[in-house]
Image (spheres, rainbow, N blue to C red):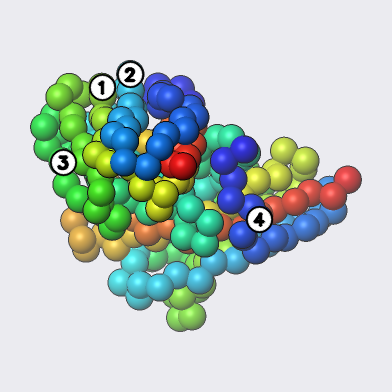
Amino acid sequence: DAGITQSPRHKVTETGTPVTLRCHQTENHRYMYWYRQDPGHGLRLIHYSYGVKDTDKGEVSDGYSVSRSKTEDFLLTLESATSSQTSVYFCAISESGRANYGYTFGSGTRLTVV
Amino acid sequence: GENVGLHLPTLSVQEGDNSIINCAYSNSASDYFIWYKQESGKGPQFIIDIRSNMDKRQGQRVTVLLNKTVKHLSLQIAATQPGDSAVYFCAEMAMYSGGGADGLTFGKGTHLIIQP
Protein backbone atom coordinates (compact mmCIF):
# COMPACT_ATOMS: atom_id res chain seq x y z
CA ASP A 1 0.00 0.00 0.00
CA ALA A 2 1.24 3.41 -0.97
CA GLY A 3 2.97 5.28 1.82
CA ILE A 4 3.05 2.50 4.38
CA THR A 5 5.25 -0.57 4.52
CA GLN A 6 5.55 -3.35 7.04
CA SER A 7 8.54 -5.55 7.64
CA PRO A 8 9.05 -8.40 7.66
CA ARG A 9 6.13 -9.76 5.63
CA HIS A 10 6.52 -13.23 7.12
CA LYS A 11 8.32 -14.48 10.19
CA VAL A 12 8.57 -17.74 12.06
CA THR A 13 9.97 -17.57 15.56
CA GLU A 14 10.30 -19.79 18.59
CA THR A 15 8.36 -19.48 21.80
CA GLY A 16 10.12 -17.23 24.29
CA THR A 17 12.11 -15.23 21.79
CA PRO A 18 11.72 -11.47 21.32
CA VAL A 19 10.28 -10.25 18.04
CA THR A 20 10.02 -6.74 16.61
CA LEU A 21 7.78 -5.77 13.74
CA ARG A 22 8.29 -2.51 11.93
CA CYS A 23 5.84 -0.13 10.34
CA HIS A 24 7.21 2.65 8.19
CA GLN A 25 5.20 5.49 6.64
CA THR A 26 6.09 8.25 4.22
CA GLU A 27 2.85 10.23 4.63
CA ASN A 28 3.90 12.20 7.73
CA HIS A 29 0.66 11.15 9.43
CA ARG A 30 0.40 11.73 13.13
CA TYR A 31 -1.50 8.58 14.07
CA MET A 32 -0.23 5.03 13.73
CA TYR A 33 -1.84 1.80 14.88
CA TRP A 34 -1.06 -1.86 15.32
CA TYR A 35 -3.85 -4.42 14.85
CA ARG A 36 -3.89 -8.18 14.91
CA GLN A 37 -6.24 -10.28 12.82
CA ASP A 38 -7.35 -13.72 13.92
CA PRO A 39 -10.06 -16.15 12.81
CA GLY A 40 -13.33 -15.36 14.53
CA HIS A 41 -12.15 -12.04 15.93
CA GLY A 42 -11.67 -9.66 13.05
CA LEU A 43 -9.21 -6.83 13.56
CA ARG A 44 -8.34 -5.92 17.15
CA LEU A 45 -6.32 -2.91 18.23
CA ILE A 46 -3.09 -3.66 20.10
CA HIS A 47 -1.51 -0.24 20.57
CA TYR A 48 -1.63 3.10 18.87
CA SER A 49 0.43 6.26 18.70
CA TYR A 50 -0.77 9.83 18.46
CA GLY A 51 2.67 11.36 18.05
CA VAL A 52 6.37 10.82 18.60
CA LYS A 53 6.83 9.08 21.93
CA ASP A 54 3.07 9.24 22.55
CA THR A 55 1.45 5.83 22.67
CA ASP A 56 -1.51 4.16 24.32
CA LYS A 57 -2.95 0.71 24.78
CA GLY A 58 -5.67 -0.83 22.72
CA GLU A 59 -8.01 -3.74 23.30
CA VAL A 60 -5.40 -6.54 23.32
CA SER A 61 -2.16 -4.95 24.53
CA ASP A 62 -0.97 -7.62 26.98
CA GLY A 63 2.35 -9.13 25.89
CA TYR A 64 3.12 -6.29 23.48
CA SER A 65 5.04 -3.06 23.69
CA VAL A 66 5.52 -0.29 21.14
CA SER A 67 7.85 2.55 20.45
CA ARG A 68 7.75 5.58 18.23
CA SER A 69 10.99 7.54 18.23
CA LYS A 70 10.25 9.33 14.97
CA THR A 71 7.16 10.15 12.98
CA GLU A 72 7.71 7.62 10.24
CA ASP A 73 8.37 4.49 12.31
CA PHE A 74 6.18 2.58 14.74
CA LEU A 75 7.65 -0.59 16.20
CA LEU A 76 5.71 -3.45 17.78
CA THR A 77 7.67 -5.72 20.10
CA LEU A 78 6.74 -9.08 21.52
CA GLU A 79 9.11 -9.35 24.47
CA SER A 80 8.72 -13.12 24.77
CA ALA A 81 6.65 -14.59 21.97
CA THR A 82 3.93 -17.13 22.77
CA SER A 83 1.92 -19.38 20.48
CA SER A 84 -1.19 -17.27 21.17
CA GLN A 85 0.56 -14.41 19.40
CA THR A 86 0.59 -16.31 16.13
CA SER A 87 -1.43 -13.95 13.97
CA VAL A 88 -1.42 -11.54 11.08
CA TYR A 89 -0.39 -8.07 12.20
CA PHE A 90 -1.49 -4.94 10.40
CA CYS A 91 -0.22 -1.45 10.79
CA ALA A 92 -2.43 1.51 9.90
CA ILE A 93 -1.91 5.23 9.65
CA SER A 94 -4.24 8.20 9.71
CA GLU A 95 -3.90 11.93 9.47
CA SER A 96 -6.30 12.36 12.35
CA GLY A 97 -7.40 10.07 15.15
CA ARG A 98 -10.93 10.26 13.82
CA ALA A 99 -11.91 7.38 11.56
CA ASN A 100 -13.64 9.66 9.06
CA TYR A 101 -10.23 10.89 8.00
CA GLY A 102 -9.56 7.39 6.81
CA TYR A 103 -7.20 4.70 7.92
CA THR A 104 -4.63 3.35 5.45
CA PHE A 105 -3.50 -0.16 6.21
CA GLY A 106 -0.24 -1.87 5.41
CA SER A 107 -0.08 -5.28 3.74
CA GLY A 108 0.42 -7.16 6.98
CA THR A 109 3.01 -9.34 8.67
CA ARG A 110 2.24 -13.02 9.16
CA LEU A 111 3.88 -14.13 12.40
CA THR A 112 4.06 -17.77 13.41
CA VAL A 113 5.29 -18.70 16.88
CA VAL A 114 6.33 -22.34 17.16
CA GLY B 1 -2.79 -15.31 1.81
CA GLU B 2 -3.59 -13.47 5.03
CA ASN B 3 -7.36 -13.79 4.76
CA VAL B 4 -9.19 -15.64 7.48
CA GLY B 5 -11.88 -16.81 5.06
CA LEU B 6 -12.04 -20.40 6.33
CA HIS B 7 -13.61 -19.15 9.54
CA LEU B 8 -15.90 -16.52 8.04
CA PRO B 9 -19.47 -16.47 6.76
CA THR B 10 -19.38 -16.87 3.00
CA LEU B 11 -21.55 -15.30 0.34
CA SER B 12 -21.36 -16.76 -3.13
CA VAL B 13 -22.88 -14.82 -6.04
CA GLN B 14 -22.89 -15.06 -9.81
CA GLU B 15 -20.84 -12.58 -11.76
CA GLY B 16 -23.09 -9.72 -12.80
CA ASP B 17 -25.56 -10.19 -9.97
CA ASN B 18 -25.93 -7.80 -7.07
CA SER B 19 -24.40 -8.68 -3.70
CA ILE B 20 -25.68 -7.73 -0.29
CA ILE B 21 -23.40 -8.12 2.71
CA ASN B 22 -24.85 -7.62 6.15
CA CYS B 23 -23.42 -6.51 9.45
CA ALA B 24 -24.94 -6.20 12.90
CA TYR B 25 -23.26 -3.67 15.13
CA SER B 26 -23.25 -3.68 18.87
CA ASN B 27 -23.05 -0.14 20.20
CA SER B 28 -26.21 1.92 19.94
CA ALA B 29 -24.07 5.01 20.54
CA SER B 30 -22.01 4.38 17.40
CA ASP B 31 -22.48 7.23 14.99
CA TYR B 32 -20.00 6.51 12.22
CA PHE B 33 -19.65 3.35 10.15
CA ILE B 34 -17.21 2.17 7.52
CA TRP B 35 -17.00 -0.74 5.13
CA TYR B 36 -13.60 -2.16 4.29
CA LYS B 37 -12.55 -4.63 1.61
CA GLN B 38 -9.65 -6.99 2.17
CA GLU B 39 -8.17 -8.94 -0.72
CA SER B 40 -5.98 -11.94 -0.18
CA GLY B 41 -2.53 -10.95 1.00
CA LYS B 42 -3.41 -7.30 1.48
CA GLY B 43 -4.55 -4.97 4.21
CA PRO B 44 -8.11 -3.66 4.46
CA GLN B 45 -9.07 -0.92 2.03
CA PHE B 46 -11.70 1.75 2.64
CA ILE B 47 -14.83 1.35 0.49
CA ILE B 48 -17.50 3.66 1.82
CA ASP B 49 -18.63 5.25 5.05
CA ILE B 50 -21.85 6.61 6.52
CA ARG B 51 -22.79 8.75 9.48
CA SER B 52 -25.66 7.93 11.79
CA ASN B 53 -27.70 10.92 10.61
CA MET B 54 -28.05 9.19 7.25
CA ASP B 55 -29.75 5.93 6.30
CA LYS B 56 -28.27 5.52 2.84
CA ARG B 57 -25.17 6.54 0.99
CA GLN B 58 -24.10 5.66 -2.52
CA GLY B 59 -20.72 5.35 -4.11
CA GLN B 60 -19.52 3.90 -7.35
CA ARG B 61 -21.33 0.54 -7.63
CA VAL B 62 -21.68 0.38 -3.87
CA THR B 63 -24.44 1.48 -1.52
CA VAL B 64 -24.44 1.38 2.26
CA LEU B 65 -27.70 1.19 4.17
CA LEU B 66 -27.99 1.90 7.87
CA ASN B 67 -30.90 0.85 10.06
CA LYS B 68 -30.29 2.25 13.53
CA THR B 69 -33.50 0.78 14.91
CA VAL B 70 -32.18 -2.74 14.62
CA LYS B 71 -28.47 -1.80 14.59
CA HIS B 72 -27.93 -3.19 11.13
CA LEU B 73 -25.64 -2.15 8.34
CA SER B 74 -25.52 -3.51 4.82
CA LEU B 75 -23.26 -3.12 1.83
CA GLN B 76 -24.75 -3.55 -1.62
CA ILE B 77 -22.47 -4.13 -4.58
CA ALA B 78 -24.07 -3.75 -7.98
CA ALA B 79 -23.13 -5.90 -10.97
CA THR B 80 -20.57 -7.93 -9.07
CA GLN B 81 -17.26 -8.48 -10.82
CA PRO B 82 -14.48 -11.04 -10.25
CA GLY B 83 -12.38 -8.29 -8.70
CA ASP B 84 -14.98 -7.93 -5.95
CA SER B 85 -13.93 -11.27 -4.46
CA ALA B 86 -12.61 -10.42 -1.03
CA VAL B 87 -13.43 -10.32 2.66
CA TYR B 88 -15.63 -7.39 3.63
CA PHE B 89 -15.60 -5.85 7.11
CA CYS B 90 -17.84 -3.33 8.72
CA ALA B 91 -16.45 -1.05 11.42
CA GLU B 92 -18.24 1.20 13.86
CA MET B 93 -17.15 4.19 15.83
CA ALA B 94 -18.69 6.24 18.57
CA MET B 95 -17.74 9.85 17.91
CA TYR B 96 -18.56 10.85 21.46
CA SER B 97 -15.44 8.99 22.54
CA GLY B 98 -13.46 11.88 21.15
CA GLY B 99 -12.67 10.14 17.94
CA GLY B 100 -9.69 8.50 19.42
CA ALA B 101 -8.00 5.57 17.87
CA ASP B 102 -9.59 3.16 20.29
CA GLY B 103 -13.04 4.09 19.08
CA LEU B 104 -13.06 1.95 15.90
CA THR B 105 -14.47 -1.58 16.32
CA PHE B 106 -14.32 -4.05 13.47
CA GLY B 107 -16.77 -6.82 12.64
CA LYS B 108 -15.55 -10.31 11.89
CA GLY B 109 -16.07 -10.10 8.14
CA THR B 110 -17.84 -11.88 5.28
CA HIS B 111 -16.06 -13.68 2.48
CA LEU B 112 -17.58 -12.77 -0.91
CA ILE B 113 -16.98 -15.30 -3.67
CA ILE B 114 -17.84 -14.50 -7.27
CA GLN B 115 -18.93 -17.43 -9.43
CA PRO B 116 -18.20 -17.09 -13.16
SS at circle 2 = loop
Q: Is residue B64 visible?
A: no
Q: Give the mark nearer the N terminus: 3 vs 2.
A: 2
Q: Is residue A61 above or below residue B60?
A: below
Residue B70, horizontal then vertical, whole percent: 49, 80
The Cα–Cα distance between marks 3 and 1, rounded to whole angstroms, is 14 Å
- In this view, the residue in front, B103 or B58, is B103
How many other residues sit within 10 Å of disc 1, few (<14), some (14-19) or many (≥20)?
A: some
Give left or right: position of B39 versus B45: right
Q: Secondary structure at mark 4?
A: helix
Query: Is B85 displayed left or right of A53 in the figure?
Result: right
Q: What's the residue at 46%, 60% (across, down)?
A: A41
| Labels 2 and 1 touching (C-beta < 8 A) | yes
Q: Within 10 Å of the Cα at label 3, are there few (<14), some (14-19), or many (20+) other Cα atoms?
A: some
Residue topped by disc 1 = A72
Residue A53 shows in this picture = yes
Q: Earlier in the sequence, mark 3 or mark 1?
A: 3
Residue B21 in percent (x, y) is at: 64, 61
Residue B94's mark? none
Work out which residue is located at the far left of the displayed protein and give it.
A53
| Numbered badge on residue A26 | 2
In three-dimensional space, the C-alpha distance between marks 4 and 3, rounded to whole angstroms, equals 34 Å
